Image (cartoon, rainbow, N blue to C red):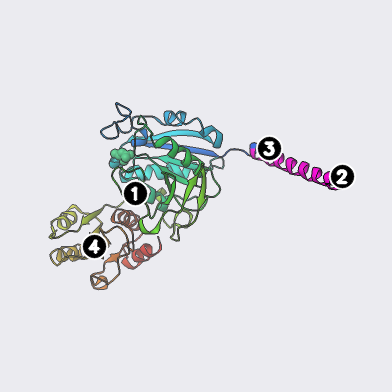
Amino acid sequence: MNRRRLGFMTVVSLLVLATHATLAGQAAQAPLPNVVILATGGTIAGTGTTSTTTVGYAVATVGVQSLIDAVPELKRIAMVRGEQVFQIASENMTCDHWLKLGRRVNELLAQDEVDGIVITHGTDTLEETAYFLNLAVTSAKPVVLVGAMRPSTALSADGPMNLYDAVSLAGSREAVGRGVLVCMNDQINGARDVTKTNTSDLGTFRSRELGPLGSMRAGRPAFYRTSTRRHTTQSEFDIREIRELPRVGIVYGYADYGSAVIEALTAAGVKGIVHAGVGNGSVSLDARPALVAARVKGIVVVRSSRVGSGAVARNGEVNDDAFDFVVADDLTPQKARILLALALTKTVDTREIQRMFNQY
Ligand code: DAS
């Protein structure tokens, strides 16, 4: 190689090295995001008597600072601080817990110095809290829910890595504006579509036929989809003025289910009933008179399905126009209940409520 060419190659190599050093320096100097962890309990905060105890352990026993201290690697990716909002098993979550949590999330995200929020939560109702927040949070900043299927004391506990990924996701620019997210088992799912699909599997959270929005790879988010439905900054719901959510009950359909539960909910004074029908949201001939009577009394009726995926067709199995029923699109019954409760804080007009189910 002649001297001129050698000289040229040397200059190029030096330029490349200098560029790398600059980028590395910039990366090293980039300020870490500020992420607040709101702890509510669950298995991620659970402790077992042995390292192989994966059922029958104590839930909601480990405090938020211990959860943070158990993952020292968090310091490399974010400035983290924790708040213990609740310390409960999530089957005990109530609408009042949701309102309190939602208000705290909005309060924190309104602070310039807060870049994102992680909520540690039991897995049993995690999807419900996530969807409520998807409708109630007023910021585009990331809100990420995370849980665990094994207690913190277990061999290969999934909580620490789930928490690491959730903090990374909550501090990432990529997660901004995507609605409330659920980050577990390397997957990123949207709050609207995700559901717990298995009682014990680490990969239990799935968005069935719609699939995850993306995945976490070596602690960094890779997104492939985004939700097309309204959420967070596009939501019309404002929880600041809501003291109590209207009571909405769910009726589960099955062969020969009759009308007793519908009549009991009606007598209990609920404002809405979500009917989790078989198939395409079918209502049995036995149950129909009670459901129509509930509507006549002013209770808003939403037809959902127990099937778990696919939308309920309006005027398909039932003449919704004739009975003034609403259909839940493809929302699961437990999520249709949340949207109906929030809708009832604004209106009892079933055409308006049907619009909401078509948009959120
Ligand atoms: N009981 C469950 C809950 O708190 C434990 C869990 O899976 O997190 O949701």
Calculate the distance from the C-alpha at mark 3 to the C-alpha at mark 4: 65 Å
The Cα–Cα distance between marks 4 and 1, rounded to whole angstroms, is: 26 Å
Q: Is residue 249 left or right of residue 201?
A: left
Whether ligand 1 has any atom under 8 Å from the Cβ at mark 3 is answered as: no
Circle 2 Cα neighbour tier, 10 Å, few/some/many (<14 / 14–19 / ≥20):
few
Circles 1 and 3, Cβ within 8 Å, touching? The answer is no
- Left or right of 115 in this view: 84: left
Q: How far is disc 2 from disc 4 in space, using C-alphas?
A: 91 Å
For the residues labelled 1 and 2, say whether their Cβ atoms are less than 8 Å apart.
no
Precedes in sequence: disc 1 or disc 3: 3
- Disc on res. 25: 3
**As rendered, which of 34 and 66 lies closer to the eye?**
66
The residue beneath circle 2 is: 3
Label 3 packing within 10 angstroms: few (<14), some (14-19), many (20+): few
Q: Amino acid at mark 3?
A: Gly
Element type where label 3 sits in the image: helix
The residue labelled by disc 1 is 128
Mark 4 Cβ inside 8 Å of ligand 1: no
Q: Which residues are magenta?
A: 1-27
Judging from the image, what secondary structure is the residue with disc 4 in? loop
Instruction: Report the disc number at residue 298.
Output: 4
Going from N to C along the chain, the mark reached first, 4 or 1, is 1
